[in-house]
Image (cartoon, grey):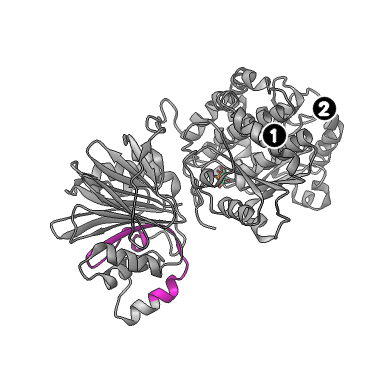
């Protein structure tokens, strides 16, 4: 949710910032901008649109600068709201929300400041200019004391042409040390070749120079540099032979599942198992796709531990005052580890005395650092905005943990890559079906029991990349109202994998077909009375959620293509939702 980047060093900054922004574009692509300092003045190029819209910034000379790619919160996706915001000697890029910006803006306007955007972020540039008396860090300190809300900032001051100041408060920011200069960015993939990194904590300031970095708290007391090795350094974030990251990442699910199972942390699992007797209830809190994996995880953990386990959307979890105490375990699931609602759920759990377990794909993330028990998925960096391989890896983790808690191993996960290969062979059939789905007026997904989370996730995936209206329903619930949506213009995707629920699911398929809707069944069975079938290879019953997601993701992908859309950059979305 907005990506920010900064560089100061020996090389030309524009190219480094531009390349970094392309790697951060998954955080928002409403506008982009770059500002460079040098020669007592700041030059800035910014525009609505994707990073490629500011390719002319590459010709700007200078060795020190900042960049931004935006997911609009305050103010539309227009040129005037693009960052960096420049005021006098200062240029600022911001990720987060400055909650008290209206009051600050009014006060600054009274002092004669003229604003040129509708954003909350511009107030930071004006505050810096208002407080600046020749001492950069003093102006930064006074500014951050005024700001409420969440903010990661990188800023330039024309009087300090080779310095960048970085500030973190509740939005991620990481400093990287490269061979020829210093970088800072919202996420590690943008830190390219940096061998060493330092993840800033809330309330920290970094002053970058070509030679290195100094760190301070908000009282300007020095902090240790404490850089660590950058383990994510060599990740490939290229599409290779694929047209889109989404398709490439669906293709990586076999490996992601196997790697997550193989790397399951038995020591952390054993600590959790040893404490399990302390917990009389467990909540799993997550958002979006991670919430759907949590629904499957809740069933698996409840069965393994024989205590009530409930999956909740993290935002609602915080709103509804859940029962939390020393007898509660909260497991927060987030591929990015930076989702604001999930972080808030984790913080609430800790504040109320509960223990916090975390499952994330980003070991360096804010959520990971809050954890009492930390678990990782090994999906690799996911660039596509729609979560695919990280969902598969989260499911794999839940299977591995549940098996571990029962004293065994989830052996099927080793075999999943072969099953995944078979599933991919159905892509031609899925592509042909997608052409029909693309012209439906509504697409609904149904499933029972273990298939219900798959229906929810299949529907979310299709909605987010194809923009087709629809929803996922528990198959038995459909007839309690939503069946009124169905007619010949609707498509229903029925996930039917559970033997013991098959007859009931077949009834639901008959009910929707009799209203004229076309039914696509995702099933290993040959007797589901659907209009079309996406066949699943044989799997052990409990593992079907892993298998059924592959054709559902491919269906979403090919429907987006059939509608002429870019599945990697769905409108209005950002991969990492760092605002509540
Ligand atoms: C959907 C999707 C989102 C995320 C959600 C949580 O494809 O990607 O629904 O799953 O924003 O993100 P994380 O897992 O990073 O907390």
Element carrying mark 2:
helix
- In the rendered image, residue 561, in percent from the top left (x then y), is placed at 51, 37
* Mark 1 C-beta closer than 8 Å to ligand 1: no
Q: Which residue is nearer to you in this view: 538 or 339?
A: 339
Q: Name the residue under label 1.
A: 273
Ligand 1 - quadrant of the structure image: top right
Q: Which residue is nearer to you in this view: 341 or 387?
A: 341
Pointer 1 local density, CA inside 10 Å: few below 14, some 14–19, many at least 20: some
- Whether 336 is drawn above or below 233: the answer is below
| CA–CA distance in space, label 1 to label 2 | 31 Å
- In the rendered image, residue 45, in percent from the top left (x then y), is placed at 26, 55
From this viewpoint, is residue 549 visible?
Answer: no
- In the rendered image, residue 111, in percent from the top left (x then y), is placed at 31, 81
Q: Which residue: 36% across, 46% down?
A: 185
* 92 in magenta: yes
Q: Give the range drawn in magenta.
A: 79-105
- Which label number is shown at residue 499? 2
Q: Which residue: 44% across, 50% down?
A: 172
Q: Which residue: 83% across, 37% down?
A: 510
Q: Which residue is nearer to you in this view: 199 or 286?
A: 199
Is 186 positioned to the left or the right of 183 in the image?
A: right
Q: Which residue is nearer to you in this view: 550 or 215?
A: 215
């Amino acid at each position: 949710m907005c990506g920010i980047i900064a560089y100061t060093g020996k090389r030309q900054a524009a190219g480094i910032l531009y390349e970094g922004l392309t790697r951060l574009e998954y955080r928002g692509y409403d506008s982009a901008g770059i500002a460079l300092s040098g020669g007592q003045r700041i030059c800035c190029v910014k525009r609505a649109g994707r990073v490629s819209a500011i390719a002319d910034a590459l010709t700007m000379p200078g060795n020190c600068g900042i960049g931004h790619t935006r997911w609009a919160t305050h103010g539309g996706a227009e040129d005037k709201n693009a960052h960096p915001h420049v005021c006098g000697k200062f240029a600022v890029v911001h990720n987060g929300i400055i909650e008290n910006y209206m009051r600050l803006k009014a006060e600054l306007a009274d002092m004669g400041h003229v604003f040129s955007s509708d954003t909350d972020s511009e107030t930071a540039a004006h505050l810096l200019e208002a407080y600046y008396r020749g001492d950069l860090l003093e102006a930064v300190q006074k500014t951050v004391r005024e700001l409420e809300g969440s903010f990661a900032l990188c800023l330039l001051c024309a009087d300090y042409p080779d310095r960048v100041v970085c500030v973190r408060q509740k939005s991620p920011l990481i400093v990287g040390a490269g061979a020829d200069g210093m970088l800072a960015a919202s996420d590690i993939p943008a830190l390219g070749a940096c061998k060493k990194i330092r993840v800033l904590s809330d309330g920290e300031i970094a002053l970058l120079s070509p030679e290195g970095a100094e760190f301070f708290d908000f009282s300007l007391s020095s902090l240790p540099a404490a850089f660590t090795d950058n383990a994510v350094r060599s990740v490939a974030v290229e599409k290779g032979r694929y047209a889109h990251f989404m398709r490439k990442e669906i293709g990586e699910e076999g490996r992601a599942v196997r790697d997550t199972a193989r790397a399951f942390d038995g020591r952390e699992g054993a600590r959790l198992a040893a404490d399990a007797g302390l917990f009389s209830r467990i909540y799993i809190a997550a958002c979006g796709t991670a919430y759907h994996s949590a629904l499957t995880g809740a069933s698996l953990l409840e069965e393994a531990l024989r205590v009530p386990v409930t999956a909740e959307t993290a935002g609602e979890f915080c709103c509804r005052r859940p029962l939390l105490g020393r007898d509660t375990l909260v497991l927060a699931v987030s591929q990015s580890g930076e989702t604001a609602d999930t972080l808030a759920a984790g913080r609430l759990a800790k504040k109320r005395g509960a223990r916090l377990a975390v499952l994330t794909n980003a070991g360096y993330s804010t959520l990971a650092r809050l954890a009492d028990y930390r678990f990782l998925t090994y999906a690799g960096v996911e660039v596509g905005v729609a979560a695919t391989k990280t969902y598969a890896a989260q499911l794999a983790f839940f299977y591995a943990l549940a098996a571990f808690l029962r004293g065994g191993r989830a052996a099927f996960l080793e075999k999943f890559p072969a099953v995944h290969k078979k599933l991919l062979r159905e892509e031609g059939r899925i592509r042909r079906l997608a052409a029909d789905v693309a012209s439906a007026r509504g697409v609904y997904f149904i499933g029972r029991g273990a298939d219900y989370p798959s229906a929810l996730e299949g529907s979310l995936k299709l909605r987010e990349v194809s923009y087709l209206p629809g929803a996922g329903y528990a198959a038995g619930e459909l007839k309690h109202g939503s069946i009124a949506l169905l007619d010949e213009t609707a498509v229903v995707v029925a996930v039917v994998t559970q033997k013991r629920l098959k007859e009931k699911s077949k009834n639901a398929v008959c009910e929707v077909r009799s209203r004229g809707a076309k039914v696509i069944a995702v099933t290993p069975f040959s007797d589901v009375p659907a209009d079309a079938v996406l066949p699943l290879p044989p799997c052990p019953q409990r593992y079907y959620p892993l298998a059924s997601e592959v054709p559902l993701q491919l269906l979403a992908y090919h429907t987006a293509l059939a509608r002429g859309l870019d599945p990697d950059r769905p409108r209005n979305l950002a991969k990492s939702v760092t605002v509540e």
